[in-house]
Each structure stands twice: as structure tokens, then as C-alpha cells.
Amino acid sequence: MSTILITVDLEDWFQVENLRSLYPLENWHKCQVRVEQSTEQLLELFHRYEVKATFFVLGWLAERLPELVKRIKNMGHEIASHGYNHILCSEQDKGALLEDIKKSKQILEDIISEPVIGYRAPSFSITQALVSGLEEAGFTYDSSYNDFHGNSRYGSLPGCWKTVKPGLLINEQGLYEIPISNIKFFGKIFPWGGGGYFRLIPGPLFQKGVKKITQNVGAYVFYCHPWEFDPEQPKVKGLRPDLYLKHYVNLARSLNKLREFLRVFVTARFLTCSQFLTEGCKSPTDSTTIGYI
Ligand SMILES: [Zn+2]
């Protein structure tokens, strides 16, 4: 049986890195919050296919929408942290980063009255300072490492990590890492974990790649954002054409595409990140690589 981890970075349309130049943090309070509606669509879909997912929630949103966070939790999903202000880890000094991750953890824990043990960095911008900060703040796992090299915002995995099982690493301080899944063709890594790549790659081809990953690696880690399922969101003017494409490509089709994905993998075992830490996954046929084939 395939093991699939569905993860959702819970942020709104104006909080995305691609739009940062037009919507800095100090202007967020003026923007229309639309995330509840698109999150509800995802919750319905997950309920329909009995998927338990992990929601990495932005602290800024959680402060304003605590009932949404509780609702997600009450539907059996895991609440984890996506930081507070969504500034890339690589652009924050160590002190500011630590403050950000501690603040978001506290806000989320106050809402759900349970420990929050997982974290995902904005745009997978993992750094050494982040890893040290997560250890200091008492997180159990991180899921910020994406080994696709074609995006300069993505960070690299700092320090020494050992494989616990396919798709799961641990460092000397006991912090776990759940990398995003990618795929390797002809020696090259292609982004296969979700987001804009999921919206861009034809559904049947994407599913074929995921089948390969689950067969060869044993587990597949998918990510998406609620705004990717909101085609009615405001269309921003003045954005660079490449950023415009990245943000808006195929928004109107993505919900059906995800529905079809879940239908095709209906027999898979869908685990939250916390469940994945403690439960076994299928043994790999090739254990020399992690997160991709
Ligand atoms: Zn994000």
C-alpha cells in the first residue's frame, strides 16, 4: 500500500512570496481574507476521501481565524506551524527568526490546547539558523527541505542527517526532517511535490510520477495552498510575467485535479506528518536516495 502525506501551507493569496513586493506585511491588514472558503473546499474533499492531512498554519492568520484552526483540528487533521510573518528564513537574522517561530508556535498551541511539533519554512527556505531555532523552540520535526535546485529561494539541508526510514531523516540533536518529494529522470531532479508544479503538469503524468515515487521510495509528500483552489481571488496588476504565471496558472482546474488525484490513490494510506514519524512505511526497493527516485 502506498503511503502519502498531504500537507497544506495555510496562507492567503496576498501572503505569497511571489506577491511580496506588492503586498508587504504592513499592508496585509488591508487585504481581503479569502482563505476560509478555499480551506473549506479542501476540508470537504479530504473528508470525502478520508484523508488526514497536515496544515502548516501561518501565525498571522491563526490570530485572526482561530475558529478555522480549531475546525481543522476537530476534523482530525494535524496543526503545525508555517511561522508568523512568512519572511524567508534566509532573509531574517537568527534572533528575528527564533522570535517568529516561537510566536507562531505559541499562538497555535493557545488555540488548539495541544503541543505543535512540526514546522515548514516559507518557500522551503531552510537554513542552519532555522534548524537551530527549531531545536531551541522545542519542535520535533521540520518539513522544509526541497532538493529541487531550480528555485533559488529553496534552502539546503544543513548539518549531518541520518536516514530513519525512506522519507524521514534525523540529525544529531534529534530533530526529524520530512523532505518534499521530487522525482529523478536521467540524473536530474524534477519538482514533483505539488504547488505550481502540480497545477502545471498534466494530471495523468503527475499521477504516474507519484506512483513511481511511492513504489521506489515508499512514501510521497505533497504540498498545496488554499489560494491555489481560489480562482476568484483578486488578480494583481504590475507583477512580473513569470511570477504572474507561477501564481495564477490553472487555478480554476486545481480542485478537480486534486479530487482526481485522491480518487486515483484512494487505496493509499494517508498519514499526517506526526503519524508518519511514529508509523512504518513500505520498505524501499532502493534505499540509496531519499525523497525522490
Ligand atoms: Zn508559504
Image: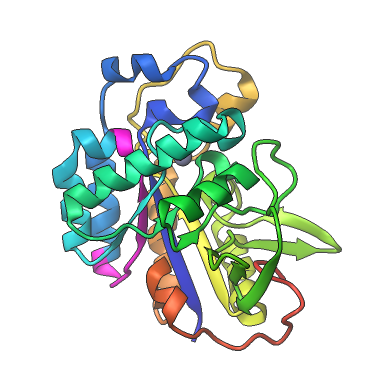
Q: Which residue is at the far right?
A: 186
Specify start and end residues of the magenta stretch as a single range: 47-60
Q: Residue at x 26, y 48 (%)?
A: 108
Question: Could one spot residue 268 in this view of the protein?
Answer: no
Which corner quadrant holds the C terminus?
A: bottom right
Image x and y of residue 130, in percent: 56, 45
Q: Quadrant of residue 212?
A: bottom right
Q: Residue at x 70, y 57 (%)?
A: 159
Protein image colouring: rainbow
Image x and y of residue 92, in percent: 55, 29
Question: Could one spot residue 256 in this view of the protein?
Answer: yes
In the figure, is residue 60 to the left or right of 209?
A: left
Q: Is 12 or 201 nearer to us in this picture?
A: 12
Q: Which residue is at the far left?
A: 67
Q: Is residue 52 magenta?
A: yes
In the figure, is residue 261 to the left or right of 234?
A: right
Q: Residue at x 46, y 31 (%)?
A: 16
In the figure, is residue 135 to the left or right of 159?
A: left
Image x and y of residue 12, in percent: 35, 34
Q: Residue at x 65, y 75 (%)?
A: 163
Image x and y of residue 177, in percent: 56, 63
Q: Which residue is at the far top?
A: 238
Q: Is 5 or 267 nearer to us in this picture?
A: 5
Is residue 268 shown above or below 80?
Answer: below
Q: Is 39 or 30 nearer to us in this picture?
A: 30
Q: Is residue 102 magenta?
A: no
Number of numbered markers: 0
